[in-house]
Amino acid sequence: MTLRVVYRSYGGDNHKDRPRGYSKLLCLQSFVRALEGVDVDVVFLNDGPVPVELLELMRGAGRVEQLVGSGMRASYWGALQLATRRPGWHDDDVVWFSEDDYLYRPDALRALARAAQDPATASADYFALYGSTPGRSVLRPEESELPDPRGWQAGEPRVVGEQEWRRLRSTASTFGGRVRALRQDLGIFRLCMWPHKTMLRDHDTCLVLQGSSPYTASDLLRPVVQPVLGGGRGLSGAVRHAVLLPFLAATALRSLRRPSRRRTFLAAAPNLATHMEDGRLAPGTDWARVAEEVRSWAAQPPVLDLDDERERSSSTATGMSETTTTTAMIGSR
């Protein structure tokens, strides 16, 4: 088993509320620090130009590939295609897909690599380092967790070393998966991208992978009939839901998987990484302290590796480039 990473980076930023001190450079530095002591193959998949200081850090930690004609959905699909089509990536390998606005604990990737191979957790198909687990919600105080799907069983915690792993219902687009499962499940990822332009239906994807439906018959039909009964979100909301209904119904049907295809999805509890968004920081870790430790680590001068320096000089002299270009086609298969 080889641990591989596809780190998706976007040159701009969105308008989410961020914790004080947040930056994409800080997130990238925390990720690079988490690589220490881990045997891992890293690909940075960049959507548009990124600042030079980030690019230099990426080139020192892995290979850089540039997306052309992309966007959020195309970047996501391009990462999935890279993981499922790349020659030499074997079925048992685990691919960690990372967005660029996550802060990592220094032990995050070491714990992931151990969980991918330890007998207690090696049967899992998918992994998360961030997401709600029993007693540790990543939602804002005013938000409520969605109800468990029918037949859902959280099961007992699994322990690897001192790290606990719990079954989780869903996470965002930062997760890990075995190449075999990713190849077999690619159609589910694709289905849950339709018909939206700016969302990926992560919650739906995670539940369907595990053989659980994100929607009941009532969920599907109530928004359409409620306006007739004088409730709901009004006529415009009913029309919008009616447009989505075929896709949502198809998603519910897709969850009817035979037992051998019902995936096991485990999350680290407490989380070993956090989405850097106000109100959604993972509980159980002092993330402000982690950020300060990352800044201190990044300020230290690098240790010069003479063999690595000779190899880099040789590569430069022969004109070798570390950056390749990939075209992400959202319609390609």
Image: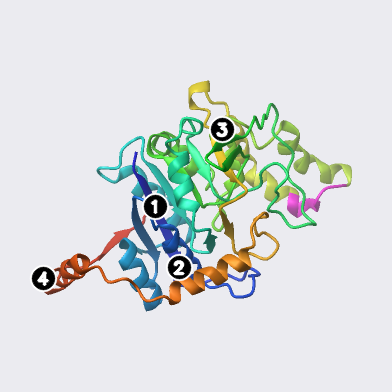
Neighbourhood count class around disc 3 (C-alpha, 10 Å): few under 14, some 14–19, many 20 upward: many
Return the disc, 1 or 4, that comes first in the chain's sequence. Answer: 1
**Which residue bears the numbered disc 2?**
29
| Of pointers 1 and 2, the one earlier in the residue sequence | 1
Tell us which disc is closer to us: 2 or 3. 2
The residue that appears at 48% across and 39% down in the rendered structure is 115
Q: Residue at x 68, y 36 (%)?
A: 215
Give the residue displayed 31% in from the left and 67% down from the top.
Answer: 59
Q: Using the rendered view, name the quadrant where residue 213 is placed.
A: top right
| Residue 283, x across and y down, in percent | 68, 55
Binning the other alpha carbons within 10 Å of mark 2 as few (below 14), some (14 to 19) or many (20 upward) gives: many
Label 1 to label 2: alpha-carbon separation: 15 Å
Q: Which one is nearer the viewer's eye here, 266 or 242?
A: 266
Q: Which residues are magenta?
A: 231-237
Q: Label 2 near label 1: C-beta < 8 Å?
A: no
User: Which kind of residue does numbered mark 1 sit on?
Assistant: Val
Q: CA distance from mark 4 to mark 2?
A: 29 Å
For this orientation, the residue located farthest to the left is 318
The crowd level at tag 4 (other Cα within 10 Å; few <14, some 14-19, many 20+) is: few
Circle 2: residue type: Gln
Q: Which residue is mark 1?
A: 5
Residue at image mark 4: 318
In what element is the residue under mark 3?
Answer: loop
Give whichever of discs 4 and 2 has the lower sequence position: 2
Sequence-wise, the earlier of marks 2 and 3 is 2
**What is the spatial separation of the Cα atoms under label 3 and label 4, in whole angstroms?**
49 Å
Q: Which residue is mark 3?
A: 210
Count of numbered circles in the view: 4
Residue 298: where, in percent of width, then height? 44, 73
Q: Nearer the viewer, mark 3 or mark 4?
A: 4
Left or right: 312, with 21 as reference point: left
